[in-house]
Image (tube, rainbow, N blue to C red):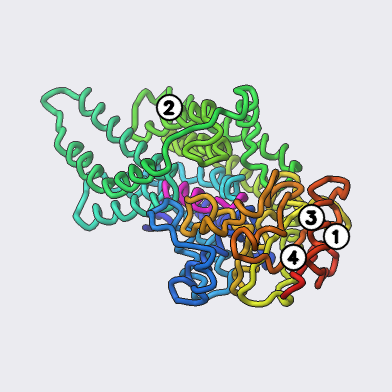
Amino acid sequence: MKIFSASENSWEKILFLLLVLILLVPIWQAKYFLSNDGPCHLYNSKLILDFVLGNHTDFYSEYYKLNSHAEPNWFSHASLALLLFFLPAFLAEKILLTAYVLLFAFSFRFLIRQINPQSTFLIFPALLFVYHFVFQMGFWNFSFSIAFFFLVIAFWMKFENQWTTRRLLLLSVLLTTLYFMHPVGLMLTIFSIALITAIRFFSVLITPSTERNWKPWIKTFLYSVGAALPAIILSINYLSRSGTGTTPAAYSQKFLRHYFLELKSLVILNHTEDLIAMMVSVFIGIIFLIAFVNRIRAKKMFPADSFLLLFFISLYLYLHQPASLGGVGIVPERLLFIPFLLAIIWAANANFHTTIKKLVAIFSLVFLCIFMYLRLPVYQKNSDAVKEYLSVGDYIEDESTILPLSFAHAGFTPDGKPISDRIWVFIHATDYLGTMKPLIMFGNYEANTGWFPLIWKGSRNPFQHISKDAGIEGLPPSVDLLNYKANTGGSIDYVLLWCFDFADKTQLPVQDLISQLDQEYQLIFVSEHSRAKLYRHKIL
């Protein structure tokens, strides 16, 4: 696809490239780009690569087995496993996240150009959504699926009546790839194609009978269904295994409305971002209203008006969603920012005055720079803390088992100040260790879900045999160290504590842990600022 068209203004091209470069700064400014689940993805991807290459498989297979089902979460793991063949983990992570940023930016631009080449300036407010709460959670498959949604819809719109065998095969591959990213992106894509096709049918229906030509759109409909068939079959198979059970909504309607209007999905690290997120919400609302007035005046329907219907559907689903669906949680955060993006896409149908275009571009640049000003120091603190956390690696033997226990999921600076008050980015940070040498990381939550490529063997699953009460990931964690070997035949070779000095020692789980460590473990390493403490089993 062409990145730029000849009709686009040079200032738009330059500003677009500038904003993309700014968006890449958080990924490359420090060694580690820490997210909630990112280290866990990397660790499991390294295990997949080792299984494929036959490295340490006897050791790993005592605790893990490969998931034989075609789960939707394979995309990021397969991509990272391939990158890990050539690169160290922290670089593989950066390459994957760079690909996400570029895919989001260029695919959204491609989509806007298919709708209205005069509205490419709308990429600027859309770029404010590249970094969102779900992305910072490390839900990379979901994030990629949203970016891929832009690409697939743009591709479909470009060739909607010019299908060849090669293009249909490519469409089928793209849709199948979307399945292996995340069902939300796939469903958005399928609904979009269906609604655009429906509007096309309606436009034919209202034409005089002598001018009606159904044939092209019937062909397009049948071709699209055929291309989507593999992804649909995979989705049905997945739902038959995972079920469609829901849990009641955890939030009131009032809370969800405020959460939406305040655009909390753009508050990703600290609540210092609250005000700027609300300003962006108002900003998008103004763009939407201007587009709405212009579209009313135009008195004409376009196929891309399907995105207005999608906007209302997605908003309804957000306001009436359950707390979890098919076992997958954090549904509100997954759905919150999607209506904003759909509103921007729909707004591309309208024609905007040059002055408005320039104002939108300027405000988008200002908002992005403010976000970067607030976030970059936090990303640097996260990376510095991860380096200290991983300094224990030299004191851990290969083919060992490690139980990481965090007492500050949001992290603390050396002087005891919280690094992040919005997200628990340190809850799986220790999994980076498992990418550096062959280790069993007992904090590997992914293997406990059944939705990812690796699964704990039930006989040694630490979430079953070590967790008690609040469990391994609780605050404070509550664990049984002393009976794991007797119950499973496995061992807990090392216990790694994070920010233990900041723990409340009066809490019973903390006192219980201290007692267990005193009985069977010895402290062998304390990191520079005492945030990481490594204990080794006394019989090793």
- The amino acid beneath tag 4 is Tyr
**Residue 507 location in percent, x, y?**
84, 45
Q: Which residue is mark 1?
A: 414
Kind of residue at badge 2: Arg
Q: Secondary structure at mark 1?
A: loop
- Left or right: 434 as drawn, with respect to 1: right
Which residue is disc 2 drawn over? 295
- Magenta span: 136-150
Using the numbered discs, state the Cα–Cα distance from disc 2 to disc 4 in whole angstroms.
55 Å
Left or right: residue 308 compared with residue 525 = left
> As displayed, is residue 491 above or below residue 201?
below
Q: Is residue 25 visible?
A: no
The residue singled out by tag 3 in the image is 513
Measure how far apart labels 4 and 1 are at the Cα level.
12 Å
> What x and y, as percent, mark residue 233?
29, 46
Q: Residues within 10 Å of mark 2 (few under 14, many from 20)?
A: some
Compared across the picture, whether 160 is left or right of 219 comes to: right
Q: Indicate the secondary structure of the residue bearing disc 2.
A: helix
